[in-house]
Image (spheres, rainbow, N blue to C red):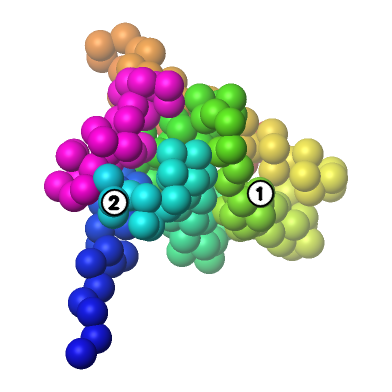
């Protein structure tokens, strides 16, 4: 008789989410695999079985975050730059801990934490593709695609990061500000 699968993809996903939340809250040096296992309702054996150790778990968190982010960007790609911008903010607000870990640099100093650079690169491909398509269609001015993509990303990223950090007056309407910024970005790169 075959042995039942004890550590499935649902548990793996739960461990990744819990890890992101704990590291976001406490920092990478202050969390333990024991904490992760307890918060996910499993054992440290499951963590080791699925990931191998702390550095591998943290690498998997980053890879998973970029994969999820990339999926949201690919799903929005048909709507062009504005849709990508909306999807960027929606994903970040739905996954704030993962967003901060992806772009905050907290995991860069963790020894052995080596996320797959191709996963992050793939997640940003829809933005580069939309810029190239806009330039080909004549709706975006000519400039190196990578320059335009990074400039647009920086604007979107800056607003989302400020929103997640709560850096605003009490009466700020982030949705309105974000839409205005997306419109301004579009005008800035118009031919």
Whole-percent x and y of residue 146? Answer: 77, 44
| Chain-order first, disc 2 or disc 1 | 2
Residue at 33% in and 49% down: 47
Q: Which of 129 and 179 is in front in this view?
A: 129
Is residue 32 within the magenta segment?
yes
User: Given the current orientation, which residue lies at the most extreme top position?
Assistant: 169
Query: Compared to 130, does 89 lie above or below?
Result: above
Q: Nearer the viewer, residue 9 or 183?
A: 9
**Mark 2 or 1: the one toward you:** 2
Whole-percent x and y of residue 55? Answer: 50, 39
Give the magenta-colored segment's residue range.
Answer: 18-43
Quarter of the image that includes the C terminus: top right
How far is disc 2 from disc 1 in space, using C-alphas?
A: 28 Å
Q: What element carries label 1?
A: helix
Q: Is mark 2 on a helix, strand or loop?
A: helix
Quarter of the image that includes the N terminus: bottom left
Q: Which of 115 and 92 is in front in this view?
A: 115
Label 1: which residue? 117
Whole-percent x and y of residue 127? Answer: 63, 51
User: Given the current orientation, which residue lies at the most extreme left position?
Assistant: 41
Residue at 23% in and 67% down: 6
Query: Compared to 21, does 61 lie above or below?
Result: below
Classify 10 Å Cα crowding around label 2: few (below 14), some (14-19), many (20 and above): some
């Amino acid at each position: 008789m075959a042995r039942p699968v004890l550590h499935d993809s649902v548990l793996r996903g739960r461990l990744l989410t819990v890890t992101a939340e704990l590291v976001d809250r406490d920092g990478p040096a202050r969390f333990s695999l024991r904490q992760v296992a307890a918060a996910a309702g499993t054992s440290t054996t499951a963590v080791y079985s699925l990931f191998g150790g702390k550095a591998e778990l943290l690498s998997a968190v980053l890879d998973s975050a970029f994969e999820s982010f990339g999926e949201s960007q690919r799903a929005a790609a048909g709507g062009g730059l504005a849709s990508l911008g909306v999807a960027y903010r929606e994903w970040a607000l739905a996954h704030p801990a993962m967003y901060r870990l992806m772009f905050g640099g907290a995991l860069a100093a963790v020894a052995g934490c080596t996320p797959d650079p191709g996963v992050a690169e793939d997640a940003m491909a829809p933005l580069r593709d939309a810029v190239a398509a806009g330039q080909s269609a004549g709706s975006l001015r000519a400039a190196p695609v990578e320059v335009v993509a990074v400039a647009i990303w920086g604007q979107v990223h800056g607003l989302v990061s400020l929103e997640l950090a709560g850096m605003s007056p009490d009466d700020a309407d982030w949705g309105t500000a974000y839409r205005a910024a997306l419109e301004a970005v579009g005008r800035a790169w118009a031919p």
